[in-house]
Image (spheres, helix red, strand yellow):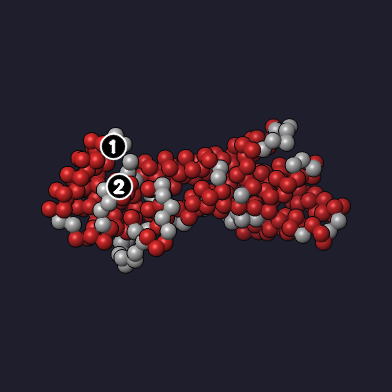
Amino acid sequence: MNIIQLFSLLDLKTNQILEFGPEDYIRIEKKINFEKKINPEIDSNTGENLIIALKEYKEEFLFVISNRVFFNFFTQNNSQKNHFSNYDVTVPDEKIKEFIALFLADDLISFFSFKLSKHWYHYLEELNLLLDLKRYFSEEIIYKMGLLVFSKLDFAVSQLAVSNTNEFSNINYIKYDPFYHLLSHFATIELDRKVVILLDLVSKYYKKGTNIIFFRSVVISMASYNAYIENLRKIFIESREILMKPKERDETEKMHLIVKIILVIFFLLIVFSKLRCS
C-alpha cells in the first residue's frame, strides 16, 4: 500500500491538507495505528511516510492526490472528474519529481508493469495518460518504464519472426493504437528501426493472407506511432490508408501497394543498419 492509498483509506479530507497541524498529525497517526491492526497491507513505513509527506511536502502531496490520473493510478480506482476539485496549487516540476521519486517510485513501476502485462486496451490507454505526465518522473523511472515498453515490442517481433500458426493472442496488444502511443513517448532512431521491423513482419503476414483481420488492425493502429524520424510516420499512415478504403481498390492493386511498402521498409532497414554502424 502506498501513501495515496492510505490517505484515501483513512478518509481524510483533501481540502484540509494545507491546514494540517500538530494535533491533526497525532489524530492521523492514531487512525493509522488502528487500521494497521485490521489491515495487514499497511506497513510501518507507509504510515511513517504518509506523516512525513503531510508535514514536509504538503503542496506536492495535494498536487498529486488532486490529479485525477495520478489518483486513479496509485489507488487503482476509476474516480470520475466530479470527484476532484481544482485547488489551484502551483508546484515546480522538479519538486513533484522529487516527491514521486521519494514516496511513490516503487508502486509507479510495479503498477505500470502489471497493467502493461495484461495487454488490455483500457490499461494501455491509462498508461498513455500517465506518460503524458512523465515530466514529473525522474530519469531512472522513465528509463525503467521504457525498458518495460520496449520488451513488449521485442516480444512481439520475436513471436512473429518464428510463428507458424494463426494464433496471436499472446501479442494481441499490437493491434491497439494506445500501444503505439506508448511507444511514441520513448521514440528514438533505434525504436523506429524496431517498429519498422515489426511493420515488415506484419506486412509479410498480411501478404500471405494469414489472419488478415488481425494484421489489418495492426497496420491501421501503427499509424499512431509518432516516429523519431518524421518521414517514417508517413509510411505508417500510407499503410493505414491502403487498408482503410478496401472498396476503392481491387485486391490486386491493394497487394501491389503492400509490396511497395515492403520495399520501402527494406530500404529503411538498410538505412538503419548503416546508421548503427556509423
The number of numbered discs placed on residues in the rendered structure image is 2
Residues tagged 1 and 2 counted as in contact (Cβ below 8 A): yes
Quadrant of the rendering where the N terminus is positioned:
top left
For the point 43% across and 42% down, the residue is 111
Q: Secondary structure at mark 2?
A: helix
Which of the pair 126/95 is nearer the observer? 126
Asked if residue 274 lies left or right of residue 97, the reply is: right
* Position of residue 273 measured from the top left corner of the image (x, y, whole percent): 65, 43
Q: Secondary structure at mark 1?
A: loop
Disc 1 to disc 2, C-alpha distance:
10 Å
* Position of residue 232 measured from the top left corner of the image (x, y, whole percent): 66, 55
Checking the image for residue 233, the label placed there is none
* Position of residue 175 measured from the top left corner of the image (x, y, whole percent): 64, 47
Sequence-wise, which precedes: disc 1 or disc 2?
A: 2
Q: Is residue 77 visible?
A: yes
Q: Badge 2: few (under 14), some or many (20 or more) residues near its Cα, within 10 Å?
A: few
Q: Quadrant of residue 172?
A: top right
Residue type highlighted by circle 1:
Asn
* Position of residue 54 measured from the top left corner of the image (x, y, whole percent): 22, 52
From this view, report whether residue 72 is shown above or below residue 91: above
For the point 49% across and 51% down, the residue is 126
Q: Which residue is mark 1?
A: 39
Q: Which residue is mark 2?
A: 9
Asked if residue 34 lies left or right of residue 217, the reply is: left
From this view, report whether residue 231 is shown above or below residue 116: below
The residue lying furthest to the front in this view is 38
Residue type highlighted by circle 2:
Leu
For the point 66% across and 44% down, the residue is 198
Q: Badge 1: few (under 14), some or many (20 or more) residues near its Cα, within 10 Å?
A: few
